[in-house]
Amino acid sequence: MGSHNSNNRAPRKAALFSPDRYRPRHAAKPKNLGRIGARTSVSASLLMMSVAGSATPLAMASGSGEAAPPAPAAGATPVAGTVAAVPVLGPPSTWVVTTPAPVLDIPAAVEVAAPEPVAVETPVAEPAPAPPPAPEVFDTTGDPIAGWINEAIRVMRAQGVPVGGGDVQAIRTIIDKESSGNPNAVNRWDSNWRAGHPSKGLMQCIDSTFNAHKLPGHDDIFNPVDNIIAGVRYTISRYGGFDGHPGLKSIRKGSGYRGY
């Protein structure tokens, strides 16, 4: 019996001095300390998230006692194989509602059509007017008598009188023999003078002959051009041309000039 009691008392003494015997009743057993510590860590993590507004799963994982990996830098390219961080909102009391900035209605720029190029017309230079044709020259002597003969022939040709350059020499011969080239000559010695109607001008026409053979606008018997016109037209009308003129026929026969 003594040995039996001694064996039973030894374990009881050990139980009396066991550390668990003097632990407060409300204290959790060691096996609950890990659970309480985890809850405390989670509460601290939630508090941090409420203050920050959001937390990543990595921050929550750090509450378990494990070291949280560093957050990736802004703009860094995520590494393959990693999970994209999802923001976690805090409690509604911590949400901050911001008014979005107003959207400005900016009208589109009005496109102004480029002005069409104006065709510039290059002024076409008008051709210079052709110079008037040089008057036809019939008598090329170049003296004043030649000028009068040329003008008289141009006037007569314009009126259809059959006269031309081949008649110049005949006209000059009559002028030389009748008046010696003086447009104001008056015959005061022949029969016409004695009859009261003297011969006048370059080709010595009497007034009646001049008036019958002049052309309109050429009415001056002492005008050299007018006098030539009347004398030539009288020769053509009376003798059929210069070949029948009595003074010229006499010269061709070798005799002296005869007045007509």
Image (cartoon, rainbow, N blue to C red):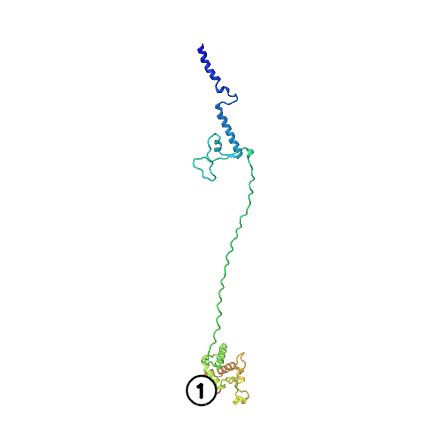
In the figure, 113 relative to 253: above or below? above
Image point (47%, 16%), residue name: 13
Give percent across and percent down for residue 17: 48, 18
Circle 1: element type: helix
Residue 224's spot in the image, x, y percent? 51, 82
Can residue 260 be seen from the camera position used here? no
Q: Residue at the spot x=51%, y=30% of the render? A: 44
Of residue 183 and residue 54, the one placed in the foreground of this image is 54
Looking at the image, which is closer to me, 234 or 222?
222
Q: Residue furthest top?
A: 1
Q: Residues within 10 Å of mark 1 (few under 14, many from 20)?
A: few
Q: Nearer the viewer, residue 240 or 35?
A: 35
Give the vertical position of 207 relative to 111 (above or below).
below
Give coordinates of residue 197: x percent, y percent.
Answer: 54, 87
Q: Amino acid at mark 1?
A: Ile
Q: Which residue is mark 1?
A: 251
Q: Is residue 13 visible?
A: yes
Query: Total label count?
Result: 1
Query: Which of 11/73 is in front?
Result: 11
> In the image, is residue 256 above or below residue 108?
below
Q: Is residue 40 above or below residue 188?
A: above
Q: Quadrant of the N terminus?
A: top left
Question: Residue 189: horizontal and vertical position, in percent?
Answer: 52, 90
